[in-house]
Amino acid sequence: MISILFALLQSTALTAPPPPPAPPWTAVTRTDATTGATSTSALAYSADRNARLVVRCDRVGEPVVSIQMRTRAGLAASGDHVVSVSVDGAAPIDLPWEFPGSATMNRGTVAVTKLTEAMSKAMSIMVTTKDGEQTVSATFVGPGTGTGIKDVLAACGYELGVVPQPVKPAAK
């Protein structure tokens, strides 16, 4: 019995704890082992940890930056509708976002440029929308400095405050 307990204690002592999560708005790059496609994202969790706000660059074919809000409860799939983003208590930026199911996102280049420029130096970001008839609202700490958001934009060839030009199609 003691040998079993001793072996159990040894095995738990050798197991390292998982690394702590990155600080809010730290850009992190991941590569899909199968496809080699990369994504870079920076995010912050709401104070109650029931939602996260993500700025993400996906490099699969044409590079695309999106802003996403994901909630613990999920968001129902539906047609595009308005999401309000208020930065530091200023008037909200109301834009249509996609609701593909489980989250909401905006990947329009003009919208992403407007939102990332506003969010980049924010101290507080409030996102509000509707999920069916229910209002969903979450407040996130802002990056304060634009570093993480700028890193995500740069990973996709975007520049803060500049609407990217469309990628030219490959010659046939």
Image: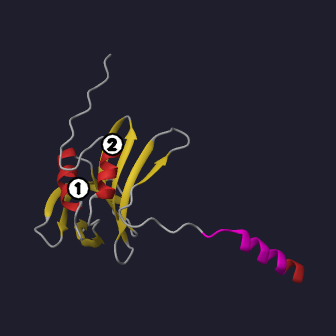
Q: Main secondary structure of the magenta part?
A: helix
Q: Residue at x 22, y 61 (%)?
A: 119
Q: Secondary structure at mark 2?
A: loop
Q: Is residue 85 above or below residue 66?
A: below
Q: Residue 122: x, y in percent?
A: 22, 66
Q: Is-magenta flag for residue 11? A: yes
Query: Label for residue 106?
Result: none
Query: Label for residue 156?
Result: 2
- Type of amino acid under label 1: Thr
Query: Label for residue 116?
Result: 1
Q: Residue 53: x, y in percent?
A: 32, 63
Residue 58 falls in image quadrant:
top left
Seen in the image, is 15 located left or right of residue 138? right
Q: Residue at x 24, y 60 (%)?
A: 120
Split into 4 quadrants, where in the image is the N terminus?
bottom right
Q: Residue 112: x, y in percent?
A: 22, 51
Q: Residue at x 27, y 59 (%)?
A: 146
Q: Secondary structure at mark 1?
A: helix
Q: Is residue 37 above or below residue 72?
A: above
